[in-house]
Each structure stands twice: as C-alpha cells, then as structure tokens.
Image (cartoon, helix red, strand yellow):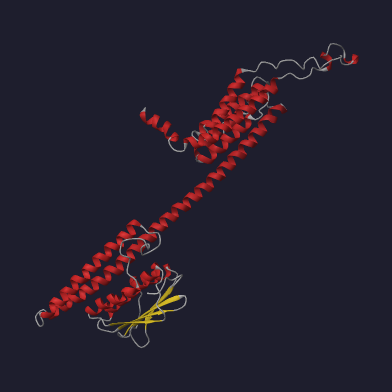
Amino acid sequence: MRSFLERVRAPWRSGAARRLALDVPLGLLVLAFSAVFLRAARTPGPPSPDKQGGPPWEGPPEWGDGPPWAGADPLPPEPLAFACIWAVALAVAVRRFYPRAAFAAATLAAAVFAAEVGGSGPILAGMVVTAYTMAARTPLRSWAPWTAAIVPLLLVGGVGRPYLGLLEADTYAVAVPYTTLLLAALAVGVTVRGRRQNALQERREELRRSAYEERLRIAREVHDLVGHSLSVINMQAGVALHVLDKRPDRVRDSLDAIRSTSKDALEELRGTLAVFRQGDGGGPGLDPGDDRAPLPGLDRLGELAARMESAGQRVSVHTEGSPVVPPAAVDHAAYRIVQEALTNALRHAPGAEARVRIGYERTEVVVEIENDGAAVAEHAEGSGIAGMRERARAVGGNLHAGPRPQGGFAVRARLPLGIPRSGR
C-alpha cells in the first residue's frame, strides 16, 4: 500500500505547482467553452412554418416585439453531458501527471458527449491535447495497442440505430474529424518525443565522451609525472649501486637525489589529482584566484634540467624571442612535452646531451628538444610520443617527433599563444 501511495505522490513532488499553473487554466478554458457550446446546443431554434399556428400559405403570424420562441428558456441540459465536460476539463488539468489515464478519460467523455448532445464542439480540443501529451511523454509501445480501441468509441453515437449507424453519413461526419485530429495529435507527440530522446541521447554521449577525455587527461598527467620521476630514481639508484663499493661518498648524493625526486613527484601528483578531482573547467592549471600551487609551466624548466643532470643527463636550455606567459593550458602542455622528451632521452640515450629551445614568436611558442644519441634505423612511436602529440593537439597546436639524420632524436611542437599575459 505504501509503495502505491508513493507512486501516486511522486509526480506531485517536483514541478507540480508549475505544471498545474499552466494546465488548470487550460482545463477551465475547455470547461467554459464546452458549457457555452452545450447551452447553445440545448436552446430551441425557430419552429418550422407548418407549426406556426396555421397553414404555410397563410404566412407567418404577426410577432410584435419578436418571435414567440425568442423568450423561451433553453431545454434542460442532461447531467451526463455536464459530467463529460467536467471529466475532460479534469483530464486536461492532470494530463502531464497521468497522461494515459487522462487521454482515456477525455476520449471516452468526448465520445459520450457527442452521442448525447449530437456534436462535440470545444470538448474535442481537450481530447486532442491529452492525446498529444500522452504521445509526447510516454513510449509508443505503452499506449499504441490499447489506443486502437479508441476508434470504436467514436461510433458511440450509432448505438441504438440500425447497423450502429454505419450506413448513415452523420456517423462519419463525427468519426472522421475525431480520428483525423487524434492521429495528427499522436503523430506530433511522437515526433516531439523522438526529438527529446535524441537530444537526451546526444547529451549522454557528450557526458560519456567528456568523462573519457578526462580520464585520458589524468592518465597523461600521471604517466608523464610518474614516468619521469621513476626514470630519474632508477638512474640514481643505478649510480648508487655502481659506486657503492668504489666511491661510498657519492652514494649519499644519489640517495639525496632519489629522496628529492620522489618528494617532488608526490607533491606534484597530489596537486595534479586535486585539480582533476575538483575540476577547474579550463584544462590543466588553476584559476588565477586559486590558493593552491599551479601545475608546472615553462618557468620551471630550470628545475627540470637540474633533476635530469643529477641523473646523469646533460641538458641545456635556450630561449629565443621575447618571453611571455602563455595561457595556463599551453604553458603546462609545453612543460610536459619537454619533460617527456627528456625522460625518453634519459631512457634511450643515457649520457647524450639534450638541448631544449623555447622560441617565442608572435602567435606561437615553439618547443624543440634534441639529443645526440645514436642513429635510429627504425622508429616505433610509443605511448609517450602519442601523449605529447595529444597534449599539443588539445591546446590547438601540433607536434612532430622522429630520428635526426645525423643521429639522435628530435621533438618539435608549435603551440598557440592565444592572448598571452604580461612578460615574466
């Protein structure tokens, strides 16, 4: 019993007042016009010539102030007709809460009204409105089968006549307009519902795509950060093992480098996950008013080069042009591209010199990383290069990576500056 009451009360909890504010006046409007139509239908008209008090050839009688029926009271209305009007008005008022029940009640009441009065009038509008609402708010399979039973109801007026009135034109004069309007309302409702469903599906797909892209974004951040830090730690650990017996005094330096690298990596990883968890809506980096440390950018290339040199990788950084502060997303993407390229150089060309060039042009910042490693005969692109290319593409830039003809490897990215902030 409680579950039934919960289902009944559920539609009234969200937006009920707003819906009633729109639908109740519409139901009252149908009620008023239908009542006027009923009164007009029950008011007697002028009598035929043979009932005006004499034979037709004698001419009409003298009326004086008006015809004798002008002051006649209308015929008493049938209570059943008024009950049908109220039923349709109520169905219109609650049509968005109980669309199928409202349509069934409005259609049955309209059919009975037409059979009782001899015409439909404005009450037909209530049936059409409930039909549209039902088709627009409920699935086709939930109402199409039993809605087919509505057609026989349109012939209620033929009950009691020979062959149910199927051989009389008056029957079709009522049934054909009813059926046409019903089918039109149902077709419009189905079309509207289809568009709503398509829009909802597109929205869901967009949300899924955004969630997927966000996961990729986090994966790239963690990959670049953890991969770089682990590479440095691995190199420092190898150096410590190598000099453990020969130069014990250098072991402390390697352990200090490992501790410093892991500490920085943990702090940066914590800040990265905090940014993604809270969401800044503007890509990597934080809003200007955020009190947390921003994600690293090109201003921290010196620290990055120092960590790489402590791991045995020689790095030189050169800047060309007038330095400006790129947008946060571009600044962070450039830093991660340099970090990933240096990490790859440390893995595949240990000991070789790596050169980093940052060139500031009018509308772009050019990031180049080259190393003097051995010549590469075949180049297979891995996840690191793919991640760098995705970072460049995400901010509207492009990236090319491949072996150098004279040996070694080169990465070149062009990233748009957009509207850069003031210089450093």
Give the vertical position of 264 relative to 7 (above or below): below
Quadrant location of the N terminus in the rendered image: top left
* Nearer to me, 324 or 244: 324
Looking at the picture, how far across and down is residue 46, in whole percent? 79, 19
Image check: 227 left or right of 128?
left
* Nearer to me, 256 or 9: 256
Give the vertical position of 186 relative to 348 (above or below): above
User: Which quadrant of the view contains residue 174?
Assistant: top right
Number of residue marks: 0
- The residue positioned 42% from the left and 68% from the top of the image is 395
* Nearer to me, 416 or 288: 288
Image check: 64 left or right of 392?
right
- The residue positioned 61% from the left and 36% from the top of the image is 182
Give the vertical position of 30 relative to 382 (above or below): above
Residue, far bottom = 406
Quadrant location of the C terminus in the rendered image: bottom left
Looking at the picture, how far across and down is residue 50, in whole percent? 84, 15
User: Which quadrant of the view contains residue 181?
Assistant: top right
User: In the rendered image, is residue 208 in sight?
Assistant: yes
Residue, far right = 57
Looking at the picture, how far across and down is residue 91, in whole percent? 54, 30
Image check: 101 left or right of 241?
right
User: In the rendered image, is residue 386 in sight?
Assistant: no
- The residue positioned 18% from the left and 70% from the top of the image is 259
Image check: 124 left or right of 277?
right
